[in-house]
Image (spheres, rainbow, N blue to C red):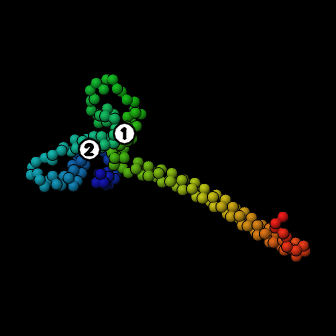
Amino acid sequence: MKLVRNIVEGTKSFCTTARCLCPCCGMVLRLSPTARKDKENIKQNQHYPVKRNHGFRKWADTTMIRSAINVVDKETLLGHSTGLDDKYYRPTGEEVLDEYQKAVDLLTINEENRLKIKVATLEERESEVQTLKAQMSLLQENFDKLRHYINKEEDRKKTLLHYINKESKRINDTYGPIDKTL
């Protein structure tokens, strides 16, 4: 697929008619690793085992099957007859488009759709990270307030214990030791 992308992106205008696609398909097939292996095994005057355009249709069919597209919608997209389903099941354009969207990443030559999905995913992650940072900041602020409150209470406790010990000593010095057996 990278080879196809390079060929398409290298041309200023890309014609999609059979007359224009055949040479392109032939170039892709000749340069692909599997075709090179086949070429070594086939005599020079023989044809390739898979015809050019048919090979692309087979590849598209296989790719759509692997993407779990509805069989009738897949056959409709390929221009095949679906038997009685042609008469009884007529999907809307939106239904066919929804099914096609399942395989669009694997079928397209341009990486634009994959990059859009990646950007959306990264933006979503960035949003989550920003939310988590805000939550962490809030938690840190609450933690600092709580620590300040605890330190303040510790100081109050020490002051109160110091005052109790001081008063206890003063009472003992004035009235003598207190009898605890009362």
Q: Residue at x 22, y 41 (%)?
A: 54
- Locate residue 151, reporting x and y percent: 72, 67
181 left or right of 31? right
Whether residue 93 is situated above or below residue 160 in the rendered picture: above
Residue 92 seen by the camera: yes
173 left or right of 108? right
- Locate residue 120, reporting x and y percent: 48, 50
Q: Which mark is residue 100?
A: 1
Gap between marks 1 and 2 measured at Cα: 15 Å
- Locate residue 53, reporting x and y percent: 23, 42
Circle 2 SS class: helix
Quadrant where the C terminus is found in the figure: bottom right
Which residue type does callout 2 highlight?
Trp
Nearest the viewer among 23 and 108 is 108
Q: Residue at x 78, y 69 (%)?
A: 161
Q: Residues within 10 Å of mark 1 (few under 14, many from 20)?
A: some
Residue at the extreme front of the image, as rendered: 181
Which residue type does callout 1 highlight?
Tyr
16 left or right of 170? left
Whether residue 109 is situated above or below residue 167 in the rendered picture: above
* Count of marks placed on residues: 2
Q: Disc 1 or 2, which lies upstream in sequence? A: 2
Residue at the spot of label 2: 59
Circle 1 SS class: helix
- Locate residue 110, reporting x and y percent: 36, 50
Whether residue 158 is situated above or below residue 91 in the rendered picture: below
Q: Are marks 1 and 2 in contact (CB under 8 Å)?
A: no
Residue at the extreme bottom of the image, as rendered: 173
Residue 85, quarter of the rendered image: top left
Q: Residues within 10 Å of mark 2 (few under 14, many from 20)?
A: few
